[in-house]
Image (cartoon, rainbow, N blue to C red):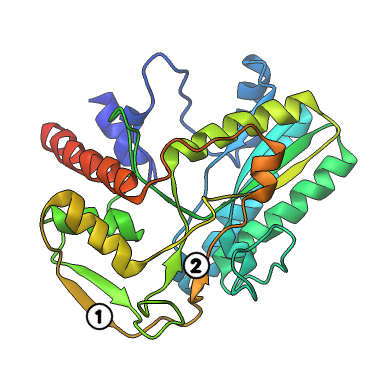
Amino acid sequence: MHDQLLNRALITGFRWAVPQSVPFHFGDIEDCDLMGHILKAQGIGAIMHFAGSVVVPESVDDPLKYYHNNTAKTRALLESAVSAGVKHFIFSSTAATYGIPDVSPVSEDCPQRPINPYGMSKLMTEYMLGDVARAHDINFCALRYFNVAGADPHGRTGQSTAGATHLIKVAVEAALGKRAGVDVYGSDFATPDGTGVRDYIHVSDLAAAHVLALDALIAEPARSLTMNCGYGRGFSVLEVLDAVDRVAGGAIQRRMGARRAGDPDSLISDVSRITAMLPWVPRHANLDTIVGHALAWERKLGEIRAAA
């Protein structure tokens, strides 16, 4: 019962997603007293910061929420980290900091021109991290995620938040009858089939990149890093839906609509920096594998919710 009540209190997370053997603290990263106590009591030497709001249209409608959750709260967390003597900080940034890039693939040196408050809130945090690292004994790695998808291959966890907007999550929900279909926004992009092309990275490969990034920060404490996280190739919306049809063994209803303002034709990562700087070798760089793991988790999630 306690865990059920805690799940309701969490904003988008779930208590059951954290193994019972792992220390769990309920609180807000903006609570400097709480964070300071945890960091000092546990002797924390590094932070991986994943907390934040991530829905782009919501950020346009409610920008103050995003500047509070993603920027101001990270400032508070950084203050706690510096005060507690934390030496290393890994930050979940995003390809949204590039806005609509002039080129694709996109390297880390491309101009960062966010077109929505979500991207800007993350870019502001990148600037903050640079300033803090120059002023204090802490280094950081900002990992700019492209489109994260899939689920743990062992079925331990996956994307579970209701009302998610990520394409593969939406598509596997539709494949299992949890949605009536999938809306395709735009068929007139400058791509082979007219739908937007994105770079999808399996969440397990992304997790591995975080561990290797932390190793790199520990090995060279005077150096900070900024790296793209993707596979360096893209798939169109229709190619993704074809993969879901193929893996699920059925056809999802596709509702074609107008393109959304600000959607780039193609957003693919240049991964030359991460592959040069880290011994990172993706293990799940296959679209059908990504979809298969997402579909398997979606089925298991239905069982978890039914048992709750």
* Residue 164 visible: no
Element class at badge 2: helix
Q: In what quadrant of the picture does the C terminus appear? A: top left
Q: Quadrant of residue 184?
A: bottom left
Q: Position of residue 290 (x, y in %)?
A: 34, 45
Q: Position of residue 150 (x, y in %)?
A: 35, 44
- Residue at the disc numbered 2: 59
Residue at x 70% of width, y 57% of height: 108
Query: Residue lying furthest right in this view?
Result: 135
Q: Amino acid at mark 1?
A: Met
Foreground residue, 66 or 213? 213
Q: Position of residue 87 (x, y in %)?
A: 76, 27
* 179 w.r.t. 3: above or below: below
Q: Quadrant of residue 222?
A: top right
* 145 w.r.t. 235: above or below: above
- Residue at the disc numbered 1: 256
Q: Is residue 91 left or right of residue 14?
A: right
Q: Position of residue 115 (x, y in %)?
A: 59, 74
**Could you tell me how far apart the alpha carbons at marks 2 and 1 are, in whole angstroms?**
24 Å
CB contact under 8 Å: marks 2 and 1? no
* Residue 205 visible: yes
Residue at x 41% of width, y 81% of height: 260
Q: Is residue 20 left or right of residue 38?
A: left
Q: In what quadrant of the picture does the N terminus appear? A: top left
Element class at badge 1: strand
Q: Amino acid at mark 2?
A: Ser
